[in-house]
Image (spheres, rainbow, N blue to C red):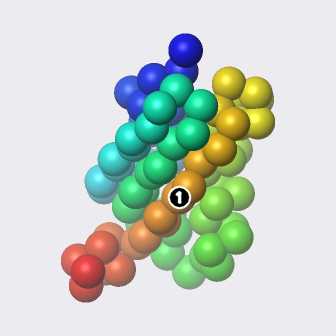
């Protein structure tokens, strides 16, 4: 079974994160990802970066991932 820690590690390996939280039940996960890499990118482009970091796990072991992708400034603004 895939754990939230495993998903967090996959994301962290592909994206330099200022803040990263992942919660889930083994198939469905929720993530809050804060990264300077998101600066100037649309929400779709941000999600594509995360999906790329997850690679083949997305859609296989990870059935669903709800993401909140923020820049550090957006995170600080709350």
Q: Residue furthest top?
A: 1
Q: Is residue 56 left or right of residue 53?
A: right
Residue 43 visible? The answer is yes
Quick check: 58 above or below 43? above
Residue 9 visible? The answer is no
Number of residue marks = 1
Secondary structure category for the residue under label 1: strand
Q: Residue furthest front?
A: 25
Front position in the image: 62 or 76: 62
Of the 4 image quadrants, the one containing the N terminus is top right
Q: Is residue 5 left or right of residue 55?
A: left
The residue at the point 53 percent across, 21 percent down is 2
Q: Is residue 74 left or right of residue 51?
A: left
The residue at the point 40 percent across, 57 percent down is 32
Front position in the image: 66 or 53: 66
The residue at the point 76 percent across, 36 percent down is 59
Q: Residue 38: x, y in percent? A: 52, 68
Which residue was labeled with disc 1?
67
Q: Is residue 8 left or right of residue 38?
A: left
Quick check: 15 above or below 1? below
Of the 4 image quadrants, the one containing the C terminus is bottom left
Residue 64, picture quadrant: top right
Quick check: 41 above or below 5? below
Within 10 angstroms of label 1, few (less than 14), some, or many (20 or more) residues?
some
Q: Residue 66: x, y in percent? A: 56, 55
Residue 46, picture quadrant: bottom right
Q: Residue 52: x, y in percent? A: 70, 44
The residue at the point 39 percent across, 43 percent down is 22
């Amino acid at each position: 079974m895939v754990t939230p820690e495993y998903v967090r590690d996959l994301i962290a390996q592909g994206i330099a994160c200022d803040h990263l939280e992942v919660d889930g039940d083994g198939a469905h996960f929720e993530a809050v990802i804060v990264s300077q890499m998101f600066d100037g990118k649309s929400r779709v482009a941000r999600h594509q970066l995360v999906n790329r970091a997850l690679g083949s796990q997305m859609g296989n072991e990870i059935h669903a991932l709800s993401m909140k992708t923020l820049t550090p400034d957006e995170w600080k603004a709350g």
